[in-house]
Amino acid sequence: MGQIQLKQVTKSFGEVQVIPPLDLTIEDGEFTVFVGPSGCGKSTLLRLIAGLEDISSGHIEIDGKDATDLVPAKRGLAMVFQSYALYPHMSVRKNIAFPLRMAKMDQAEITRRVESAASVLNLTDYLDRRPGQLSGGQRQRVAIGRAIVREPAAFLFDEPLSNLDAALRVGMRLEISELHKRLETTMIYVTHDQVEAMTMADKIVVLQAGVIEQVGSPLELYRAPRNTFVAGFIGSPKMNLLTGAEAAKYDATTIGIRPEHIDVVEADGAWQGTVGVAEHLGSDTFFHIHNTGLAETITVRAIGDVNLKHGDTIHLTPRAEEIHRFDGQGLRIE
Amino acid sequence: MARAVTSRRKLINTGIAWAIGLLIFFPILWTILTSFKTEAQAIASPPLFINFDWTLENYGVVMERSNYARFLWNSIIIAGGSTILGLIIAVPAAWSMAFVPSKRTKDILLWMLSTKMLPAVGVLYPIYLLFIQLGLLDSRAGLVIVMMLINLPIIIWMLYTYFREIPGEILEAARMDGATLKEELIYILTPMAIPGIASTMLLNFILAWNEAFWTLNLTAVDAAPLTAFIASYSSPEGLFFAKLSAASTMAIAPILILGWFSQKQLVRGLTFGAVK
């Protein structure tokens, strides 16, 4: 029970329209990720759904009911903030219990729910500590605990992992995904990190300047980006986007080829260039290639540790079937 | 990198700090010393420092001649009442300016502070007439209101600075968790701002306690606080220095003790926001 529909929603701050009319449906139980560069309006969109900002026009429906004018608490949504936003003067127990206290729930039920949330999130031993005495990961779990006790129609996550270090981030990413599998509740997750988007989402919404560029499953976006923006944004390292004569060979204004779809060959490749920077990860090697005769630097991913270094000559062949073609407007040509 | 300070330099700095501190404290010390002298010793030349006959006579005379307790009680009511009333008005005002600022918020803050630049005597006449009209002359209620209004800009300004340090996301989280505006203020904002509110209260209490212009001009007998108590011992002939000193010492003692015990809180409050 957590379908969310945005109908012709707009948001302006004074004269500036940050979200032009936007339609979007998030299905019940779906894990949806809003992704885009800084300032693309993804957090604003989340705050509009939460009710922390008023929309300028349009409608928001939650479970088929108009929620446009409802205050945040009445929308049945729970939010996890980037800064965790824990109440520093309350113990973990009181933090998690706070929404239930505000709902005037009886004490026995509050205790039961807090303890069950704490056990799910491995926080049982920390219930009497203050947030200041916890690590970043534990704080984030308390914030999630505070959200799950309410049994909301949907969870809203606003870049929840960006304050954590890299190792912890991967761990928490898994925990949130597992939580979603267990609760089967709608989740909307905002991030600028396309790796988070790809690994967690059922559905990704790519945003730029308040406009939805594409909606689809991670692999749909990877395999068939609708335009050059999505092509460049989804995938790591970035897709190579080539223009000019090379694109013209394929009847396109721009062509795109992912680094993993270019093969390093012994000789007689389609392109020949010199290695600029070689990034050896062990499992893969990324080469940044210059002097290919193309205007752009080419990034190539080779499997395993390939023994080429700065200044070496390299021969490359793109896989023809993996080339994406885009027209003058940057839209995909099928 | 921490700047290297040699122990010699430290010693000199400490010496200078002590010298300045003592210089500032000297008038108060002198007042206290004078209060234990006889009237003759008080005006003796050269002045006597501590080698005089210590006496409590002045305190006895002062206690006998005036009702110290009534003056003290008036001071407590006026300082305490204006502080609490000011806080009730300032908390919502500072909340709105800190968390839902408008384009004019900065201007309003500056305008409020600018009212402090007006010489008080400039508005004495209108306020005096108003007090006569409203029957507030020589009443504690009247002084509570005036003192609250005088210090309100400072209270709002200080609370605003404190509230600005509280992340807005925490209040938004409370809103998502179902807290009403009232619950948000009571359960989240106020407990988080308690150190700030406490030092604001303390400072305001001290300012109101020490204020002399309005208390002297708007009171006569019934509402007269300790400032009026001191003034009643200053005579143009200047013949009663020892008694005046005893009265002054009795008037400043309560606030001096309060300040002494809360100095840590006070310093933290006044430098809040300056250090991060």
Image (cartoon, rainbow, N blue to C red):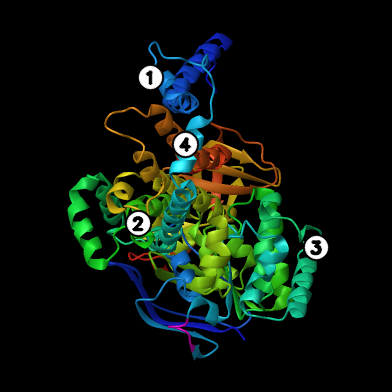
Q: Nearer the viewer, residue A56 or B155?
A: B155
Q: Which residue is tagged 4?
A: B61
Q: Residues within 10 Å of mark 3 (few under 14, many from 20)?
A: some
Judge whether residue A68 is colored magenta.
yes
Left or right, B216 with respect to A263, comes to left
**Chain hosting mark 1:** B
Q: Earlier in the sequence, mark 2 or mark 1?
A: 1
- The answer to whether marks 1 and 3 sit on the same chain is no
Left or right, B119 with respect to A204, comes to left
Q: Earlier in the sequence, mark 2 or mark 4?
A: 4
Whole-number angstrom distance, CA of label 2 to CA of label 3: 55 Å
Q: Nearer the viewer, mark 2 or mark 4?
A: 4
Residue A297 visible from this viewpoint: yes
**Which quadrant is home to the N terminus of chain A?**
bottom right
Q: Which residue is tagged 3?
A: A124
- The answer to whether marks 2 and 4 sit on the same chain is yes
Say which amino acid is labelled 1: Ile
Q: Residues within 10 Å of mark 2 (few under 14, many from 20)?
A: many
**Chain hosting mark 4:** B
Q: Earlier in the sequence, mark 4 or mark 1?
A: 1
Q: In terms of image quadrants, where is residue B130?
A: bottom left
Q: Which mark is residue B43?
A: 1
**Chain hosting mark 3:** A
Whole-number angstrom distance, CA of label 1 to CA of label 3: 74 Å
Whole-number angstrom distance, CA of label 2 to CA of label 1: 36 Å
**Which quadrant is home to the C terminus of chain A?**
bottom left
Q: Which residue is tagged 2?
A: B143
Question: Residue pushed farthest top?
Answer: B8
Looking at the rendered structure, the number of numbered marks drawn on it comes to: 4
Q: Which residues are magenta?
A: A66-70
**Chain hosting mark 2:** B
